[in-house]
Amino acid sequence: MQTNELIAAPAASLKSFAEIYKQELTGNILPFWLSHSKDEKNGGFFTCLDRTGNVYDTDKFMWLQGRQVWCFSYMYKNVAPHQEWLDMALHGARFMQKHGRDDKGNWYFSLTAEGKPLVQPYNIFSDCFATMAFAALDKAQPNDLYKDIALSTFENILQRRNNTKGTYNKAFPGTRPLKNFSLPMILCNLSLELEHILGSARVDQFVPEIIHEVMDVFYQPKLGVVLENVQPDGSFSDSFEGRVLNPGHAIEAMWFIMDLGKRRNDQSLINKAVDIMFDTLEMGWDKEHGGIFYFLDVKGHPVQQLEWDQKLWWVHVEALVALAKAYAFTGDSRCIPWFKKLHQYTWDHFRDNEYGEWFGYLNREGKVLIPLKGGKWKGCFHIPRALYQVATTLSSLETK
């Protein structure tokens, strides 16, 4: 049964969607990146791919290199042991090992095609995805060197976590020292990715702190949302930065929290994450044109991000993962109509039926804004990970 047939069949269970998600992953998304992104001359990956897969810029962004190494390592380990997937991961990892870090072990933001540094290591997410990459590669092909890179980078992240940009921070110190949600969010997931290296005992010690940061500091019960920035004590900052809501970040974080709740056998934590997810979906959904807004102001004021009303690929696919997990972990019936509505919007608007892969950026009305398949921010990560997570989660459901 195809996606439109599933939507048209009101009685179709969510489990019936699992196969089309797996087929999209293995038959469309991964082949696109295998065919078009590999730099045979210099190593690593080209991520700036136009609609048909042609390379339009050769700069290499280290966080996207890490994401793609993670993706092919993870799929090799968890979907099927295709040698071409492992070879792709190793190809990217060799480039990262050779060119990716400065002499202090920090991962650059971007390099030339040949591997010369372009942008300094100001962005800690280069380090986060390098950690994920080598941890996943170590699972696919165990190697002490991969373990060491993953662990040393993770320790470096923890050392930098209170001042992630270091000398590259442009904010004046002390006046408005806001904490940002992005790093605590990703640490929820990163700790589980590294568990085979860190050990369960250390993860068990680390996880409660991260859950507290997300659910007690950045989540604001009075506002009913997870904020992007708060005061160091967790209080609300009535400023542009303090009022901003990124629905995609909040929803993605909630499925990370659901996974942690499942690991800890904490159903109350899972239920709280599911409720926050629904509140965020309700607030973030564009009731006029459909889709989820990129940014909002929690007080309804004009936002500073001019792209606030765009519809982005990662926001929608991460919400599909969250809904699938919410239903699997709680059986909450609200998930079914929401999943089907979001599935239809996402597959109708982002999927490119002609040239493969998915578009990344739509305008508010849902029309393609930029017809790229990869660039500085979009690479081989959110879509394949989401397709895998949805397929795996829904296939585990009992048919009802």
Image (cartoon, grey):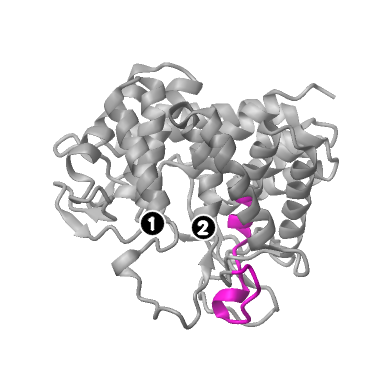
Q: Quadrant of the N terminus?
A: top right
Q: Residue at x 52, y 35 (%)?
A: 202
Q: How many marks?
A: 2
Q: Residue 61's x, y, as percent?
A: 30, 51
User: In the rendered structure, which amino acid carries the disc numbered 1?
Assistant: Arg
Q: Residue at x 39, y 43 (%)?
A: 154
Q: Residue at x 32, y 43 (%)?
A: 65
In the image, is residue 384 part of the stretch drawn in magenta? no
In the image, is residue 238 part of the stretch drawn in magenta? yes
| Residue where numbered disc 2 is placed | 182
Q: Residue 47's x, y, as percent?
A: 32, 47
Q: Nearer the viewer, residue 86 or 207?
A: 207
Q: Residue 109's x, y, as percent?
A: 29, 55
Q: Which mark is residue 160?
A: 1
Q: Look at the numbered discs 1 and 2 and tell me whether their residues touch, using CB distance below 8 Å.
A: no
Does label 1 or label 2 sit earlier along the sequence?
Answer: 1
User: In the rendered structure, which amino acid carries the disc numbered 2?
Assistant: Ser
For label 2, the SS is helix
Question: Which stretch is magenta?
Answer: 233-253
Q: Residue at x 45, y 32 (%)?
A: 198
* Figure check: 14 above or below 233: above
State the separation of the CA atoms marked 1 and 2: 14 Å
* Figure check: 339 above or below 176: above
Q: Is residue 26 left or right of residue 335?
A: left
Q: Is residue 383 left or right of residue 293?
A: left
Q: Nearer the viewer, mark 1 or mark 2?
A: 1
Q: Residue 372's x, y, as percent?
A: 39, 53
